[in-house]
Amino acid sequence: MKFLITAGPTRERVDPVRFISNRSSGKMGYALAEMAYKFGHEVCLITGPVNLKTPDGIEMVYVESAEDMYNAVRDNIEDCDCLIMAAAVADWKPEECNPSKLKKDSFDGVLKLKRTKDILLEIKEFKKDRVFVGFAAETDDLIKNAINKLETKGLDFIVANDVTQPGAGFGVDTNIVTIFDSQGGVTELPRINKADVAKKIIEKIVEFRT
Ligand code: CTP
């Protein structure tokens, strides 16, 4: 299969020296890319700015903002069998990026934000028989929010994690996830390494496809 995987945070520029972003390390997306490649699949990894080693054998696309990530997904979607959106895409960006550095004596401290594109929603029309997988990073109402995202974003699987639990979510090498599928299936995994979570997800996708 040909996998298109996104990883890491996006950065939304405030001015030439500042940005807003989030705590994603990219580890889950990179683990997925490495595992899919290890299983013999072709992989294109679209990554936001992270501090991780470039994996061997994987086609890399480096992006910064949500808009860049959307464009990269759009450019590669028709060539893939499976899209996994593991990236923590910023939901808001400054209404405009100030062309020069905001000076502390003249800036009033109020940043006006606007919504970024929801990549999964925008790309939905290209789903066809492709497998689409999303992640849900939640702090409350994990099951309700994850199932809502599964349905509204038209996904085959959603991998939900409660990012407030120790050993889950941002920056750490382990994760605690529950995988919901569009047929009503639920797979709860214990706290395991992100590589093992990735293995389970890739296996599920391949099984679903065959
Ligand atoms: N996602 C996306 N485009 C965005 C935001 C999120 O494609 N602008 C994708 C993520 O990559 C993930 C899924 O949508 O696979 C859910 O992301 P999450 O941040 O959990 O939820 P949101 O849709 O952003 O909703 P909320 O922030 O309200 O929880």
Image (tube, rainbow, N blue to C red):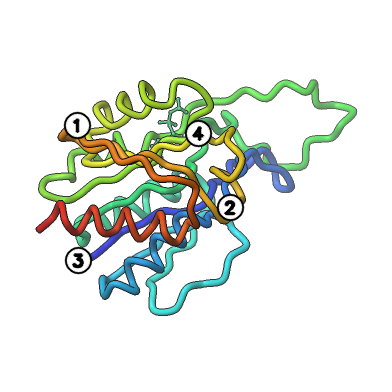
User: In the drawing, what numbered circle is on residue 25?
Assistant: 2
- Please name whichever residue, 30 or 44, is drawn nearer the observer in this view of the structure: 30
Q: Spatial distance from mark 2 to mark 4, Cα to Cα?
A: 16 Å
Discs 1, 3 touching: Cβ within 8 Å: no
Q: Amino acid at mark 2?
A: Ser
Beta carbon of the mark 1 residue lies under 8 A of ligand 1: no
Tell me the quadrant of the picture where the C terminus can be found: bottom left
Is label 1 or label 3 in front? 1
Q: Spatial distance from mark 4 to mark 1, Cα to Cα?
A: 20 Å
Residue in the image at 50% along x and 33% along y? 162
Residue in the image at 16% along x and 56% along y? 207
Q: Spatial distance from mark 3 to mark 2, Cα to Cα?
A: 26 Å
Q: Which residue is mark 1?
A: 184
Q: Amino acid at mark 4?
A: Asp
Q: Which residue is mark 3?
A: 1
Q: Which residue is mark 4?
A: 162
| Residue positioned most to the front | 190
Discs 3, 2 touching: Cβ within 8 Å: no
- Please name whichever residue, 77 or 104, is drawn nearer the observer in this view of the structure: 77
Tell me the quadrant of the picture where the N terminus can be found: bottom left
Q: Spatial distance from mark 3 to mark 4, Cα to Cα?
A: 30 Å
